Every structure is written in structure tokens, then in C-alpha cells.
Image (spheres, rainbow, N blue to C red):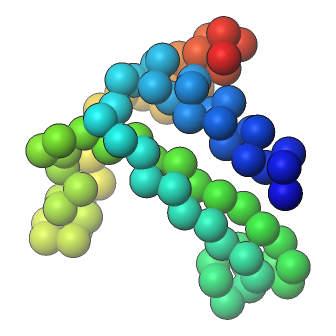
Amino acid sequence: GAEMVQLLARWESAIKRAYGPDGINLGANLGRSAGAGIVGHFHMHMVPRWHGDTNFMSTVGETRVVSEDLGETYDRLLRALREA
């Protein structure tokens, strides 16, 4: 419990440092039927959000918007996490 909250706080700091979002969506999945895929497995998602972002694209246009290469995302978050 407490370890997960500490980890989420560290990632929140890293995401804010790396991307400067206006907010962050936080979601949790527990168990196979909730999307975790494995009985008893628990994981969380943190999604940075900005005023006017393109979240509607997935729903309306069946399109995903990726603003940078995933390798760059990894490098950017790793640097920010090391500073968090």
C-alpha cells in the first residue's frame, strides 16, 4: 500500500518535470476482468493531460496521437525519474 503511493508520488514528480502537464489521470487495474490479464495482479496507469489535449482522437477518429518517439519518451522519463 504505502510503497505504491510513494512510487506514484515519485512518478508524478518525474512526469511533471519531464512534460509539465496541467493534470494527470490515474487509473488502477486489479485482476483479469479489470484488464490486468492475470488473477490477483495489480497495476496502475498515470497519463499526463493538458488543457485542450487530443484525448477525443481515440474516440472520434479511431486514431492515436504520439507526439514523440517512444525512445525519446523513455530517455526523458528516465532522466526526470533520476532527479525525482
* 43 in relation to 23, above or below: below
At 72% from the left edge and 61% from the top edge, which residue is drawn? Answer: 43
* 55 in relation to 30, above or below: above
State left or right for residue 44 relative to residue 15: right
Q: Where is residue 82 in the image (x, y as percent from the top left)?
A: 71, 13
Residue found at the very far bottom of the displayed protein: 33
Identify which residue, 59 or 24, lies in the foreground.
24
Identify which residue, 2 or 33, lies in the foreground.
2
State left or right for residue 2 relative to residue 60: right
Q: Position of residue 35 (x, y in %)?
A: 63, 78
Q: Where is residue 9 in the image (x, y as percent from the top left)?
A: 65, 36
At 56% from the left edge and 34% from the top edge, which residue is drawn? Answer: 12
At 13% from the left edge and 70% from the top edge, which residue is drawn? Answer: 60
- Quarter of the image where one finds residue 55: bottom left
At 85% from the left edge and 45% from the top edge, which residue is drawn? Answer: 3
Q: Can residue 52 be seen in this view?
A: yes
Identify which residue, 38 or 5, lies in the foreground.
5
Q: Position of residue 68 (x, y in %)?
A: 36, 27
